[in-house]
Image: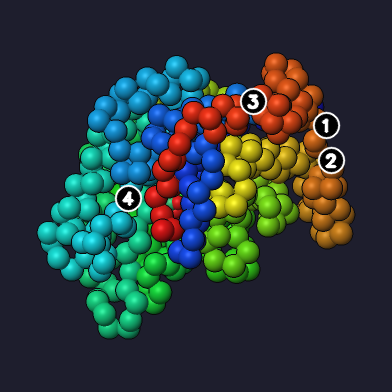
Amino acid sequence: MTDIKTALRAQHIETPSWAFGNSGTRFKVFAQKGVPRDPYEKLSDAAQVHAYTGVAPTVALHIPWDKVDDYADLARHARELGVGIGAINSNVFQDDDYMLGSVTHPSAGVRRKATDHLLECVDIMDATGSGTLKLWFSDGINYPGQDDIRSRQDRLAESLAEVYDRLGEGQRFLLEYKLFEPAFYATDVPDWGTAYAHCVKLGPKAQVVVDTGHHAPGVNIEFIVAFLLREGKLGGFDFNSRFYADDDLMVGAADPFQLFRIMYEVVQGGALDDGEDARSAKPFGGSAGGEAPRRVAFMLDQCHNIEPKIPGQIRSVMNVQEATAKALLVDREALAAAQSEGDVLGANAVFMDAYNTDVRPLLAELREEMGLARDPMAAYAKSGYFAKIVAERVGGTQAGWGA
Ligand code: PSV
Ligand code: MN
Ligand code: MN
């Protein structure tokens, strides 16, 4: 139990700044009371999630949704609140110029603009001390013949190489894939294989990020996780739940069993945080080819369209913790024995025993040992923070999309 608790205490789950702003679908963005009016207030809300869970010490930024004049000052504000800046998420999908793509656009001028934005994000990493750049491209085509698929790959590779070369020591980028949307016929980075191939060519500072909402229904995500970990190319997760498309619902809400299976592969692959400060920019990976990943980022990429945002994030962090605790409970010795004996039902029973264990008492005990309330949801609700922000904040900002 001590080992399990140590691992759970060391696991860091990163909250996204955009989860705290108003969000919605393309049909309607619902304005909630007390939402942050600027990036500073988003960090204050994220700090609440950390204060009650003890395991969410970093916050991802999205540029330009979190644009400020002085990023070092924003990082200082975060530190004062007891959190740090996590991944810097680039955004090359919201300008009119990007209608036909960003880094894969047929026009060299648009590609230059997009790549310059990615380089600016590395500057922001320097200013904030972030070690991770997250790249997601909405690039793709809607109609067969619209553009040349192979040329678009060439343009993508060229831009990625320029950004890769700009990365400093202890910095990496994570390339995110997504099956479809907003492009509907062919996305330029549609799957893990495409992301993986680009990252392998570039070297150890390029890794793949798995957004759990970005696959076709029925895809075996834990297999992808196992494979990428084995190759030293799993950089992190964008956790969320989906029922249909890229729903961005709370992680563990749609399919907690899938989350458990994913976390089992993370545990089995030796990729839980090593307990060092996830904020510190430390080197990861070794020589190109076969390097072991030093740290997998457990990030949430969600929006809370109809539920309150801070409790939505707290619940999500708890869901990841519960899946992780269950994964750590798998009796790996018994499982390996059953597997080597070809005992199909025995092996499955060992696996399911762990999944069916109620780990909530264990996590409550851990929180007590960490000096926290046993029930973070109840403790936050009692704190009065929500009433305070409702009174203080009028006219909160939108998270950035869905209008
Ligand atoms: C794209 O769907 C995505 O998952 C990328 O990570 C974006 O940066 C993010 O959503 C915005 O929520
Ligand atoms: Mn994502
Ligand atoms: Mn997404």
Q: Residue under circle 2?
A: 358
Q: Position of residue 167 (x, y in %)?
A: 27, 37
Q: Nearer the viewer, mark 4 or mark 3?
A: 3
The one of 346 and 323 positioned closer to us in this rendering = 323
Q: Which amino acid does label 4 sit on?
A: Asn
Checking the image for residue 256, the label placed there is: none
The answer to whether 55 is drawn above or below residue 354 in the figure is above
Secondary structure state at the residue bearing disc 2: loop
**Label 4 close to label 3 by CB (< 8 Å):** no
Secondary structure state at the residue bearing disc 3: loop
> Does residue 143 appear left or right of residue 53 in this picture?
left
Mark 4 and mark 2 lie on one chain; the one further toward the N terminus is 4
Mark 1 and mark 4 lie on one chain; the one further toward the N terminus is 4
Res 296 seen here: no
Q: Give the spatial CA distance, label 4 vs label 2.
A: 40 Å
Q: Give the spatial CA distance, label 3 vs label 2.
A: 30 Å
